[in-house]
Structures are given as C-alpha cells and as structure tokens.
Image (cartoon, rainbow, N blue to C red):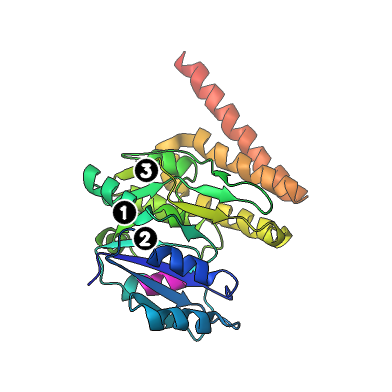
Amino acid sequence: MPEVSIIIPAYNRSKYIERAVYSVLNQTFSDLEVIVVDDASTDNTSELVRKIQSNDNRVKYIQLKNNKGAQHARNIGIKESDSTWIGFLDSDDEYLEESVASRLEQIKKDGNKVVYSACFVKYPEKEIELFKHPVFSGHIYKQILNCPAPTFPGLLVEKGALQHMGTLDEKLVAFQEWDTSIRLAEYYRFSYLSAPTFIYHCHLDEMISGDMKRELNGYKQIVFKHLFAILRNLGLSGLGHHFRALAMRYKKQEKMIQYIFFSFFVYFFASNQQLNNSQND
C-alpha cells in the first residue's frame, strides 16, 4: 500500500482536473496514490480522469451518483485510503513538486501527526505571490479557535488522527478546513512548513455574492459550533472578536438588522470586560 494518499474532490472541474492530478503524480515523492472522488459531475471530468488512470495505476477514481459536496467526497476518500498519511488537494489547485516530500520530512522530524504549509496564490493576469495567513505551530488550539490558518491543500495528516477526530463535518457550507483544524488541534500538536507547497488559483469570476453569503454562513456555523470552546479558552473578548467579524460581514451585505444584533453583543462583551478589569484594579 502507498505511504501517502492525496484526496481530490471534484465537481465539474474538467477545465482544471488534469493539472491537479498531474501535479500529484509528478511529485518527487512517488510512494503515493491519488484518490479522485467525483461528486456526480455532469461534464467530462470522468473521461479525463479515467484517461490518466489508464496510464498510471496510482490513480484511484470514485464516481458518486449524487452530489453531496466536497466534505462528503473527502470523507469517502479518507475511508477508501489505506495509507499512513492523508493529504488533500482542491481540484482547481496544484501541488509544487516537493509538496509531499517536504511536508512528510517536516512532520517526521517533529514527531507530530499534523503539518500544514505556506502556499502561493495566483490571481488572473497577475504574478504569483505568497499567500498571507497566520502561522501557528505546536499546541495551537487557542490560536486556531481565534482565527483560521491551515487550508486543506496545505494539510498532511496521519490517518489515525483523522479517524480519532471523526468524520469531516458535511453540514458546513464554508470554512471547512477551519473546523477540521480546530478539531485536530484539540488533540494534536501541529507542525508548520514555511516553504510554499502548492498554488492556490483564485478565480475572480467565481467570487460572486453567493460566495460571500456562503462564507458568512460558514463562519457563523463555525463560531456557534465551537462557541463554548471559544468562551472557555478565549473568554468574552474572543467571542466578541468573532461577533465583530460577523457584524462586519453582515454590514458588507447590507443586512442591517443582523449587523445591529451582533454589534450589540460586541458592545456588551466589551463593556463587561471593562467592568471586570476595573473591579480587578
């Protein structure tokens, strides 16, 4: 069995799927497999992947009958893998050729079960640049409750850790890797690799109002799912930080009732914190 499985969920990605799959097959580390989970695509994604599969037996293709989302596809991929390590790649992104080898080296050196890395971002008609994100390592549970950091393509995780954590949450509409990282960080130390290991391709034509609404709803799902953990570890100020972020997202979408609702709690939390500080002085 291969040491590493890379899971690629795909839905109508015929434009990009070949680039994604070949970026895994062309890794300097070759003891791996690619598990493409086709989430009931209606384009020719299947034809393209099967053609690659006919020339490289490291490609495993799973075609689902019903579209259930990327998290469901990732869960299927994890279940189908027999490897020690699990990585993820979005079907429109690509690994750099040392991606697997460098993360595997880092995680074995540190003796951890989870590693994530930096990445490049490519916007249309712009030069590639380093993607800015928070950098955490070690016991990061409190930090990751405060803000998202790892992305799915940057993660490499021991399969046993994923099994201990439980299945990926399929109800989340956005920030799915944030939830996964929070749940992993509750039990495991994280390694961090500062060298970029993949390219995140940002498609501006897909960044529409529907995506903004989905991100807002996903952020809110994460905050309320982990609300008590946030309160225990970060206090009211930590919850206020997230409520402020939600308020600003609602304001951007001109949802003023929701904006006022969350802003009220931000003010309440801040006033409560000031009162506590004055009593302690």
Mark 3, Cα crowd under 10 Å, few <14 / some 14-19 / many 20+, is: many
Nearest the camera: 275 or 14?
A: 14
Q: Which residues are magenta?
A: 72-77
As measured in the structure, the alpha-carbon distance from the residue carrying label 1 to the one carrying label 3 is 12 Å
Using residue 183 as the reference point, say whether residue 273 is left or right of it: right
Q: Earlier in the sequence, mark 2 or mark 3?
A: 2
Residues under numbered marks 1 and 3 in contact, where contact means CB atoms less than 8 Å apart: no
**Secondary structure under badge 2?**
loop
Q: Residue, x 74% and y 47% (percent of image)?
A: 252
Q: Is residue 216 visible?
A: yes
The residue labelled by disc 3 is 193
The residue labelled by disc 1 is 101
Q: Residue, x 39% and y 64% (percent of image)?
A: 26
Which mark identifies residue 27?
2
Q: Identity of the amino acid at label 2?
A: Gln
Q: Residue, x 44% and y 43% (percent of image)?
A: 145
Q: Identity of the amino acid at label 1?
A: Ala
Residue 134: image location, x then y, percent:
48, 39
Mark 1, Cα crowd under 10 Å, few <14 / some 14-19 / many 20+, is: some
